[in-house]
């Protein structure tokens, strides 16, 4: 049995599975033809064809949200072939310490600089929130083609001294920053198909951070509005700024939401157990 993630233009799992005559369990994190369009690229017939080939030839497919499952089932026409297994993340053994800091309020974002991640909206919201909370500081962990554009944008907004762009970091360094943070943000914009389950939110929750996030995709199932975080309409800069200010100025609310957020954290051990069940099912059906 072969377990692999579906990657753009990567044929190795399919070829190896066929050569060894082993069943293939494919983890699909993203439909690349659709993601390309979301990135602003022209629709690719080649990527669409590849998506279909891989999904139809895999013995079983593991996806992480109902929306992604439905999207793939529409292509493979076999609902029993697509299994839903939510993501989990490793527990690094850290817990954020709201209030135990040098006086600044630390906001953290982890992810790529894709348009739908809403980093531009986040910078605008931080600029608004900074007027009410001068000690506010944002760290944007990640990278992308337009990272420099966002750095320049923070300068134009007058918040360059209050925003850090450390780029991609190794997991231990990410955990260190999460431990020093007060809240995590995921300000997604509306997209054509909201199929994602942001891993960044799982990391925030595992660190015991309250989460401010948009009501798109699977996010409303991950964050309980008013209990483990605050949900906002996608693309609403004013609502995002207001949510940041609310958590920045109410330490008891941050603490309570952080505790509730940690209780919703999904551990990777449960994900691994469910993946093993899928692999065993594929092997027994071979």
Image: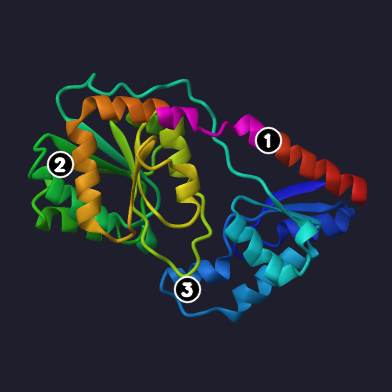
Magenta-colored stretch includes residue 129 = no
- Does the magenta stretch mainly form a helix, a strand or a loop? helix
Q: From the viewer's perspective, is residue 150 above or below residue 85? A: below
Which residue sits at x=41%, y=73%? 40
Question: Which of the two discs, 1 and 2, labels the residue nearer the N terminus?
Answer: 2
Q: Secondary structure at mark 2?
A: helix
User: Magenta residues?
Assistant: 260-272
- What colouring does the structure picture have? rainbow
Q: Quadrant of residue 89?
A: top right
Residue picked out by circle 3:
37
Question: Which of the two discs, 3 and 2, labels the residue nearer the N terminus?
Answer: 3
Residue 53 is left or right of residue 242, and the answer is: right
- Give me the C-alpha separation between circle 3 and circle 1: 31 Å
Residues marked 3 and 1 touching at CB (< 8 Å): no
Which residue sits at x=43%, y=66%? 191
Magenta-colored stretch includes residue 268 = yes
Q: From the viewer's perspective, is residue 174 above or below residue 212? A: above
Instruction: Residue 267: give x, y in percent of width and height.
Output: 57, 31
- Neighbor class of circle 1 (other Cα within 10 Å; few <14, some 14-19, many 20+) is some
Relative to the observer, which residue lies in front, 67 or 8? 67
Label ID, residue 272: 1
Which residue sits at x=41%, y=35%? 204
Instruction: Residue 113: give x, y in percent of width and height.
Output: 36, 56
- Give me the C-alpha separation between circle 1 and circle 2: 39 Å
Residue picked out by circle 2:
162
Which residue sits at x=16%, y=53%? 154
Q: Nearer the viewer, mark 1 or mark 2?
A: 1
Residue 250 is left or right of residue 171, and the answer is: left
Q: Secondary structure at mark 1?
A: helix
């Amino acid at each position: 049995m072969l377990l692999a993630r579906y990657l753009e233009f990567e044929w190795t799992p399919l070829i190896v599975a066929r050569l060894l005559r082993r069943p293939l369990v494919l983890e699909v994190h993203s439909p690349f033809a659709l993601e390309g369009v979301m990135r602003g690229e022209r629709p690719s017939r080649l990527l669409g064809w590849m998506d279909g080939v891989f999904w139809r030839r895999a013995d079983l497919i593991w996806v992480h949200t109902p929306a992604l499952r439905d999207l793939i089932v529409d292509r493979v026409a076999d609902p029993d072939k697509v299994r839903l297994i939510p993501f989990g993340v490793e527990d690094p053994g850290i817990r954020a310490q709201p209030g135990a800091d040098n006086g600044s309020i630390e906001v953290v974002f982890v992810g790529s600089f894709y348009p739908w991640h809403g980093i531009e909206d986040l910078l605008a919201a931080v600029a608004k929130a900074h007027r009410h909370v001068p000690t506010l500081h944002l760290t944007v962990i990640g990278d992308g083609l337009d990272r420099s554009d966002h750095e320049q944008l923070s300068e134009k907004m007058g918040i360059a001294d209050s925003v850090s762009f450390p780029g991609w970091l190794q997991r231990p360094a990410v955990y260190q920053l999460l431990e020093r943070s007060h809240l995590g943000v995921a300000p997604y914009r509306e997209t054509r198909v909201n199929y994602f389950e942001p891993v960044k939110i799982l990391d925030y929750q595992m660190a015991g951070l309250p989460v401010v996030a948009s009501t798109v995709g699977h996010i409303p199932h991950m964050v309980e509005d008013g209990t483990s975080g605050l949900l906002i309409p996608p693309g609403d800069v004013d609502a995002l700024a207001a949510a940041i200010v609310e958590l920045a100025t109410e330490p008891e609310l941050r603490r309570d939401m952080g505790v509730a957020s940690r209780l919703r954290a999904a551990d990777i051990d449960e994900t691994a157990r469910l993946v093993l069940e899928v692999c065993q099912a594929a092997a027994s059906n071979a």
